Image (cartoon, helix red, strand yellow):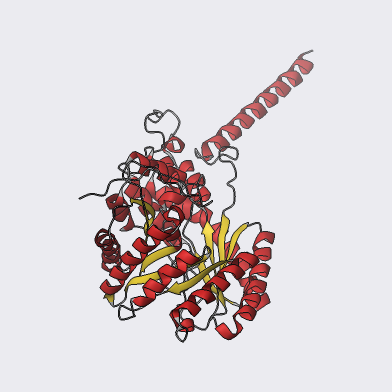
């Protein structure tokens, strides 16, 4: 009996040791898992989209239809390649050199007829089209800016720009011409919506895939890619909230400040997540280059929003307060820093975009008065892209528009960074009125009074 009891005791002791070891191993594993890193704590993030694949061609009026056909063949192949890699392509685009170069021998009416014909072709073939800047240098003829205004009013797909600052400083003649163009288009396009297709650009480099400031000055036969990735920014900034930083036996975060994130961790997380997608998209772009012979010009990393896919909402997750509150500047700097950390071939702005009427949260905050022109300019000091899709009262005259554009150009030159102004004064509307745009990319908002 003593032998049986001894054996039973040894077995019970061994079983007890196994249980203790198992519990210790489990505890060690739990201690090794940092908050926010558990396998089920962070759901997979939806992939970003490709906002645009933009082809750059050197348009020759004598054979432009053949050039467009060739570009569309490349763009169709590119769209298929990106979608095979898991990235939906929203638009395909074709950008030319500055349009005065290829209509300089045409009378005004013939030039307008050509662009109506080109606009019809873009509609038929399903591509967006940028015809480049009316004025690239400050010495260019301002009558070309007047012609651009007529082109924008007479077409619906074509987009253009005026360069108001470059390496040589601010182009004050171009600033005045841009203000006149904006006013002209606002008075002659339905709902004053034509200025959605126009931008005054400052230090925006050639080969940017985003519109309307896209242009090039080289031989063409190149393409670039633009992202729509505000969803990735929102996921990463939300996942680095204060709640994720809580350790065992630590007081939980203040529920009134749910998402006070650590900027350094947020920057690293965003660079890692967006960088993974950027490298995958670039790999697909290089396959397109090899298969088509078109040169890959780079990726514009700007995390563009689109209505409910909101960059404003992403920033609010990070700050834990409405866009425009203290902390918004820090969030802008975090996102910009993360984009700078991503190692891909880049082009265009590659910075934070805050397009008021293309982002549902930004449009709401603008309507509330939580953000204004001065705030957007301040944020532009650490990000891009300037004053983008901003509604203004119809009473804004050319002198006021000149001053606004001049501020954007001055900031761009001071910090040597690409910025643009896409201003939408609405004829017949005043402060407190709602816009009535009917473009699928735009959100309507309340018009603010301009500071006197």
Residue at 26% across, 72% down: 172
Q: Is residue 418 visible?
A: no
Q: Compare residues 156 and 47 and report the one nearer the observer.
A: 156
Is 101 placed above or below 206 here?
below
* Left or right side of 110 for 204: left
Quadrant of res 184: bottom left
Residue at 47% across, 84% down: 106
Residue 337: x and y in percent read 39, 57
* Left or right side of 282 for 268: left
Residue 113: x and y in percent read 52, 75
Of all residues, the one furthest to the front in this rendering is: 109
Q: Compare residues 238 and 28 and report the one nearer the observer.
A: 238
Residue at 49% across, 38% down: 35
Count of numbered tags: 0
Of all residues, the one furthest to the top in this rendering is: 1
Of all residues, the one furthest to the left in this rendering is: 452
Residue 330: x and y in percent read 34, 49
Residue 179: x and y in percent read 31, 64
Q: Where is the N terminus found, in terms of image quarters?
A: top right
Q: Is residue 435 visible?
A: yes
Quadrant of res 277: bottom right
Is 16 placed above or below 397 here?
above
Q: Compare residues 318 and 451 and report the one nearer the observer.
A: 451
């Amino acid at each position: 009996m003593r032998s049986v009891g001894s054996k039973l005791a040894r077995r019970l002791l061994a079983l007890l040791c196994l249980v203790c070891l198992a519990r210790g191993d489990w505890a060690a594993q739990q201690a090794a898992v940092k908050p926010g890193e558990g396998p089920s704590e962070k759901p997979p993030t939806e992939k970003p989209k490709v906002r645009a694949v933009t082809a750059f061609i050197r348009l020759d009026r004598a054979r432009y239809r053949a050039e467009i056909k060739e570009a569309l063949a490349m763009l169709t192949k590119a769209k298929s390649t990106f979608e095979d890699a898991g990235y939906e392509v929203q638009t395909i685009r074709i950008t030319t050199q500055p349009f005065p170069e290829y209509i300089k021998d045409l009378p005004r009416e013939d030039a307008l007829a050509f662009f109506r014909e080109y606009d019809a072709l873009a509609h038929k073939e399903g591509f967006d089209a940028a015809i480049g800047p009316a004025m690239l240098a400050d010495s260019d003829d301002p009558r070309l800016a007047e012609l651009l205004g007529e082109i924008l009013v007479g077409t619906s797909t074509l987009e253009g720009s005026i360069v108001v600052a470059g390496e040589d400083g601010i182009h004050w003649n171009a600033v005045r011409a841009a203000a006149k163009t904006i006013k002209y288009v606002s008075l002659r396009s339905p709902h004053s919506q034509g200025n959605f297709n126009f931008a005054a650009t400052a230090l925006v480099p050639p080969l940017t895939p985003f519109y309307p400031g896209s242009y090039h000055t080289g031989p063409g036969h190149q393409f670039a890619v633009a992202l729509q990735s505000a969803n990735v920014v929102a996921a990463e900034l939300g996942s680095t909230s204060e709640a994720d930083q809580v350790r065992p036996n630590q007081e939980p975060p203040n529920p009134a400040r749910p998402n006070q994130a650590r900027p350094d961790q947020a920057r690293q997380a965003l660079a890692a997540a967006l960088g993974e997608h950027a490298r995958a998209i670039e790999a697909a772009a290089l396959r397109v280059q090899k298969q088509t012979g078109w040169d890959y010009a780079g990726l514009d990393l700007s995390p563009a929003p689109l209505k409910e896919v909101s960059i404003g909402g992403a920033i609010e997750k990070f700050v834990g307060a409405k866009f425009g509150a203290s902390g918004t500047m820090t969030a802008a700097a975090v996102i910009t820093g993360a984009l700078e950390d991503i190692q891909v071939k880049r082009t265009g702005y590659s910075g934070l975009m805050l397009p008021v009427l293309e982002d549902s949260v930004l449009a709401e905050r603008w309507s509330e008065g939580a953000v204004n022109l001065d705030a957007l300019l301040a944020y532009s000091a650490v990000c891009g892209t300037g004053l983008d899709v901003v509604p203004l009262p119809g009473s804004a005259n050319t002198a006021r528009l000149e001053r606004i554009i001049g501020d954007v150009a001055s900031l761009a030159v001071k910090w040597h960074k690409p910025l643009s102004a896409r201003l939408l004064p609405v004829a017949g509307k005043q402060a407190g009125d709602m816009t009535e745009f009917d473009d699928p990319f735009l959100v309507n908002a309340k018009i603010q009074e301009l500071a006197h």
